[in-house]
Amino acid sequence: MNSSPNAGPAIEFRNVGYRLNNGSTLLRDFTLEVQRGETLVLLGRSGSGKTTTLKLINRLLTQSAGAIYVDGRSLDQWDVIRLRRMIGYVIQEVGLFPHFTVARNIGVVPQIEGWAADRIQDRVTELLRLVGLEPQLASRYPRELSGGQRQRVGVARALAADPSFLLMDEPFGALDPITRAELQREFLALQQRLGKTVVFVTHDLREALLLGTRVALMEAGQLVATLAPDEFLHSTDPMVAAYVDAFKTEVSPVSQDNDEPSK
Amino acid sequence: MNVVQFILQNHTEVLELTAEHLWLVGASIALAVLVGIPLGILITRWPLLSKPVLGGANIIQTIPSLALFGLLLPAPWIGARADRLAILALTLYALLPLIRNTYTGIKGVDPAVVEAGRGMGMTDRQLLWQVEFPLALSVIIAGIRVATVLSIGVATIAAAIGAGGLGEYIFRGLAMVNNQVILAGAIPAAALAILADTSLGWLEKRLAPR
């Protein structure tokens, strides 16, 4: 199982638990494998432990039980700074540095990795194009951008040093529906080209089914099921079905009342 | 004879006392910056220290300035010269706004920004100097501003222990029961305070993020 780094799963959780100091358990007996090049979506409602799971991967949190492997190596054998620099990280609040220009924001990891200035500049231009932004935006500050542009910069920044992993925590959650749909489409196209190993957190079933190669449903700190998108919709697992149902009612409450009598 | 005439007639002395005043304030603020900012940063890293450090700085500020000058008098080396003693006392007074503003400034940086930096693999030092400190800078400058204005006021009392400064006129005027002499010390001191307040306020605005 612990063979060469490139053979096994890209990320592996083995019986992982996470408990706060006050004793409450946020994650229990969590076992999951993320395959190389796939987009694994962690789906679940608020407080189900998705974000906790994500932050365990780049050691923003440290598990209290079990083991996590990245590239076949246990996390405690990784130098945490090295680990984080090979994992791109995108969050809902974007977290762009307000005092840096777009170019400096995107170039942060290359800069702390000691790249030469002109190489960083080329990379920034390349990345701006990649995420569909005009290179002229490079000299702007985050406050001068729209929400969608900011999130694109966030994605570009995460990709800057060409990491093999990408962790995305509800990256499109704060956007209006049209911009969100646009970014989702672009993410799919981008992922097809780049083939990163992506762990994507969302509570939006539609987003999960659209973007995920597999969808892992979480509830109360536990993994309910890991399914391919088409399996997910037809699963007989009561919790999965409940999530799908809840979403159906949420989408069209009026037409449902009119078209079909309640079950 | 009015105040303006008095100041004009004694302009050499007024300038000398102003220079002394500036020396007391400048030296103490510089020392307070050198001590207070690192202390403020330190207690963001060791939260256990934050209560005792802030509490200590708070207590120092509640000591009446005249009493503080007196309390420091027996200190070796420091007590030997009045200006040293005044500078030390003023430094102690200036510590609280500096420590507190450095601490709250860094603590007040958007947690999403800090988390993004950490998640990208910034070391603690990179996070501090590239992200937290620059984003806290305007709040820290605000602390320097408060400390400076405070020091300019308190430094007038340093004349009571013979440390010079514009307080000389104030105490001399009090002894002579002469308002013009009092004002000849008070007005330049007030002008210094206003000048420091506006210029540091301008700097604070310029450095504010967003």
Image: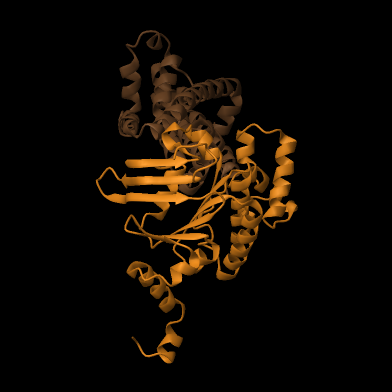
- Give the x, y percent position of residue B145: 50, 36
Q: Which hue is chain A drawn in?
A: orange
- Give the x, y percent position of residue B164: 47, 19
Q: Is residue A45 visible?
A: yes
Q: Quadrant of residue B72?
A: top left
Q: Is residue B193 visible?
A: no
> Residue shown at 41%/42% (left/top)?
A68
- Give the x, y percent position of residue A224: 35, 60
Q: Is residue B111 above or below residue B41?
A: below
Horizontal side of residue A5 vs B48, given as left or right: right
The quarter of the rendered structure image containing the N terminus of chain B is: top right
- Relative depth, front residue between B19 and A154: A154
Coloring applied to the structure: by chain
- Relative depth, front residue between A36 and A125: A36
> Residue shown at 39%/20% (left/top)?
B160
Q: Disc count in the image?
A: 0
Q: Is residue A255 above or below residue A20?
A: below
- Relative depth, front residue between A113 and A256: A256
Q: Which hue is chain B drawn in?
A: brown
> Residue shown at 70%/39% (left/top)?
A120
Horizontal side of residue A223 vs A179, given as left or right: left
- Give the x, y percent position of residue B167: 45, 25
